[in-house]
Image: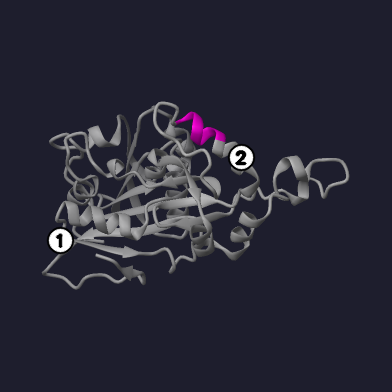
Amino acid sequence: METDHLTDSGALWLELVDVGAGSGGLTSAICRQIHDAGFKLKFRLWFVDLEPADPARFFGDKKSRGVVDSLLYLGDDYRSWLSREKPLPAADGLRIALVSRLFNNLSRFSIHCLNGSDLSSLSEKMAIYLDSDAYLPHHCLTPGSKGAEALVISNTRLALPNGRTFAQASLSDFYRGMYIISRLEGSVDTLEEGLFLPVRSFNPECLVTSGGGSVLSYLVDNCDYVIIEDADLRPQDLVEHMKTYSLHSIHIQDMTKALGLTGNYAYIIWPKNKSKKEPDFGGECIW
């Protein structure tokens, strides 16, 4: 932090911009932990979300009110908000943008037929279901059968080249029906062999402002650091976006492995500063 941004009481400013804030619980928890750790800070907070909530309720006690200098809720789509000429005023201290589980709310869903090679690359356990129909509900649930415990309907997420699917082989016929219904106006090969499973994939449009610019570029222009946690934003998706918008003045570290995350991805993004040594947060540099 910069020591030239002191309050009258000698405290340092810390500004947090919660993009896709929801209830505001994440930022309030961060502020509380920082304060409880003994850091002498004053907080300035911005909450950006479509539906106005009341994050002030998390700062109602006397101790919390004493460390929050200002709190502003912006009821707007983040892509429209970032398209404004000045989405935020000039910073008075270190400013960090938080984007937690926002982009995956706009992910794309589709149904794919996965064949043997597709499933073998996922899991040997999944591939064996191509050679048997014993896992299907009409077999598992008949009298005298193994019962519901034989169903394969796990919420385990499996990686595919174009996104993620779920280990739900027993629902293949259901997804086959959904696949056919969704393509009634086009040609559909109803005899296609394989497991029909839902695929959830990252939507690149969630990183584009309503004015056609880069969401990440605008966030970096207005904040010292951008911290992202997301279920579907893979490193290759992030790199593709950076290439598309030629964002060569920005650093990205992938913190997923460093933080031991398995269900989500995490990144720290910040602008390059040629006059200072770049920080190392212990992640993998991907850009």
Q: In the figure, is residue 87 to the left or right of 170?
A: left
The residue located at (59%, 52%) in the rendering is 167
Q: CA distance from mark 1 to mark 2?
A: 47 Å
- Main structural element of the magenta stretch: helix, strand or loop? helix
Three-letter code, disc 2: Asp
Query: Circle 2: is it few (<14), some (14-19), or many (20+) Cα within 10 Å?
Result: some
Q: Quadrant of the C terminus?
A: bottom left
What element does badge 1 sit on? loop
Asked if marks 1 and 2 touch (Cβ < 8 Å), the reply is no
Three-letter code, disc 1: His
Q: Is residue 193 above or below residue 161?
A: above
The residue located at (52%, 61%) in the rendering is 122
Q: Pick whichever, 84 or 231, lies toward us.
A: 231
Instruction: Count the marks.
Output: 2
- Tell which circle, 1 or 2, labels the residue nearer the N-terminal end: 2
Q: Is residue 56 above or below residue 194?
A: above
Q: Is residue 11 visible?
A: no
- Asked if residue 165 is among those painted magenta in the image, a careful observer would answer no
The residue that label 2 is drawn on is 173
Residue 11 image position (x, y, % from top left): 30, 54
Q: For the residues carrying marks 1 and 2, which lies nearer the camera in this image?
A: 2
What element does badge 2 sit on? helix
Query: Circle 1: is it few (<14), some (14-19), or many (20+) Cα within 10 Å?
Result: few
Q: Pick whichever, 193 or 152, lies toward us.
A: 193
The residue located at (25%, 36%) in the rendering is 79
The residue located at (28%, 66%) in the rendering is 286
Q: Quadrant of the N terminus?
A: bottom left
The residue that label 1 is drawn on is 248
Q: In the figure, is residue 154 to the left or right of 54?
A: right
Residue 199 image position (x, y, % from top left): 47, 46
| Span of residues in magenta | 177-182
